[in-house]
């Protein structure tokens, strides 16, 4: 799919306007990466091509996940016309996804407003039913849980997705890549590389780049066989591949795969694969309502006792205890407030 923006300014408009709806505990690095790309585009173009407005539901600045808040912030209803409204999410996104936020986004969609999201903001759009049958992206840590929760959304593991009038993006610095691709669509191919050079970026990533490649950050780009093996593992969690199958698909011997993992990862590949499946199971346990048995099957375990033992060996408690402790932690503040009343 082309990374060119799906919407263009009205005829005669000289400026592209974006609104960023900040939700409590949003990711500041994601927001600033997006805004800084627009700022630098204006500087490189030597004219005001882009304007942006920070908004909240009530106009009061909200704190990002690092505790900082941004000003000026206006009420969403007072933000004025825009081509795209981006929902900026971060941690504890379910708490930030209030009925008021959902209602406001649905009103924008009824007015044919193009909508986007940064980091976990895609969860809010999905919860509002505004990503059904759209290709969409959220931060990779939340992907598995949301695939289960919103089956009508076509989730992608790429950096960002532009599908008709929806612009969804992962977190971290990925919004910078999204904006550079949008800018390239508006201003041509010469401006985006100039912005990239100002920010000392090696290259402009596109909507075909994966947001998370296992082991790449640990071992670098030069160990392609190792990275490919880890990617195959991540893509086959529900029906795990044998080490021989992985080696065959990578095009090396099983013994070579074992040597690569032991040398650069510090553990045998079977242990790495098992831990990867268990970490996925932990995410599903904490982020979805799936039963323990459903989680076990989704992560390639056919025997509940075996799943429970492996889980306890890695995390120190059983899957059932993990979920129970998580629920008790959520209820604790309510209980303490009740005891003081």
Image (cartoon, rainbow, N blue to C red):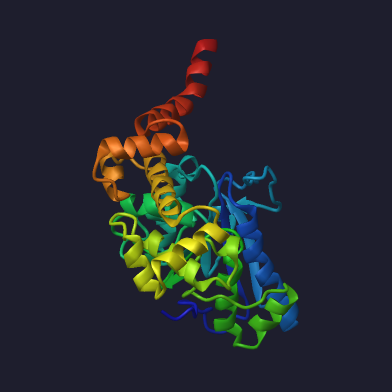
At 55% across and 54% down in the image, what residue appears? Answer: 266
Relative to 207, does residue 157 appear above or below in the rendering?
Answer: above
User: Could you tell me residue 246's position as x and y percent?
Assistant: 36, 66
Question: In the displayed structure, does residue 238 sit left or right of residue 222?
Answer: left
In the picture, residue 191 is in which quadrant? Answer: bottom right
Query: Considering depth in this image, is 224 or 179 the residue closer to the camera?
Result: 224
User: Could you tell me residue 131's position as x and y percent?
Assistant: 37, 61
Query: Considering depth in this image, is 139 or 183 the residue closer to the camera?
Result: 139
- Count all numbered tags in the image, as a single digit: 0
Relative to 109, does residue 141 appear above or below in the rendering?
Answer: above
Relative to 272, does residue 319 appear above or below in the rendering?
Answer: above
In the picture, residue 110 is in which quadrant? Answer: bottom left
Q: Which residue in the rendered view is the most extreme toward the left?
A: 302
Residue 80 in view here: no
User: Could you tell me residue 49's position as x and y percent?
Assistant: 66, 78
Residue 123 in view here: yes
User: Could you tell me residue 140's position as x and y percent?
Assistant: 47, 57
Query: Considering depth in this image, is 332 or 226 the residue closer to the camera?
Result: 226
Q: Quadrant of the N terminus?
A: bottom left
At 37% across and 62% down in the image, what residue appears? Answer: 235
């Amino acid at each position: 799919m082309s990374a060119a923006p799906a919407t263009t300014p009205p005829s005669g408009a000289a400026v592209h306007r974006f609104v960023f709806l900040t939700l409590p505990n949003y990711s500041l690095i994601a927001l600033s990466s997006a805004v800084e790309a627009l700022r630098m585009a204006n500087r490189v173009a030597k004219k005001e091509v882009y304007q942006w407005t920070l908004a909240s539901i009530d106009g009061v600045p909200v704190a990002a996940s690092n505790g900082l808040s941004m000003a000026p912030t206006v009420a969403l209803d007072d933000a004025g016309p825009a081509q795209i409204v981006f929902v900026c999410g971060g941690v504890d996104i379910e708490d930030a996804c209030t009925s008021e936020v959902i209602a406001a986004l649905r009103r924008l969609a009824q007015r044919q407003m193009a909508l986007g999201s940064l980091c976990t903001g895609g969860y809010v759009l999905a919860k509002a039913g505004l990503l059904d049958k759209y290709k969409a992206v959220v931060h990779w840590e939340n992907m598995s849980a949301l695939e289960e929760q919103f089956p009508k959304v076509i989730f992608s593991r790429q950096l960002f997705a532009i599908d008709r009038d929806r612009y969804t993006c992962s977190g971290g610095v990925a919004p910078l890549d999204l904006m550079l691709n949008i800018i390239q669509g508006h201003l041509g191919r010469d401006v985006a590389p100039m912005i990239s050079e100002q920010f000392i970026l090696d290259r402009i990533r596109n909507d075909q780049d994966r947001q998370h490649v296992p082991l790449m950050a640990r071992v670098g780009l030069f160990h392609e066989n190792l990275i490919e093996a880890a990617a195959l593992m991540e893509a086959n969690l529900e029906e795990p591949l044998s080490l021989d199958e992985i080696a065959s698909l990578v095009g090396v011997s099983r013994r070579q795969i074992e040597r690569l993992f032991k040398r650069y990862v510090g553990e045998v590949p079977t242990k790495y694969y098992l831990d990867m499946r268990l970490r996925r199971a932990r995410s599903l346990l904490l982020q979805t309502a799936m039963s323990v048995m459903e989680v076990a099957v989704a992560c390639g375990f056919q025997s509940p006792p075996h799943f429970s033992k492996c889980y306890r060996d890695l995390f120190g408690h059983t899957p059932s205890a993990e979920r129970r402790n998580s629920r008790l932690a959520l209820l604790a503040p309510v209980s303490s407030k009740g005891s003081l009343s």
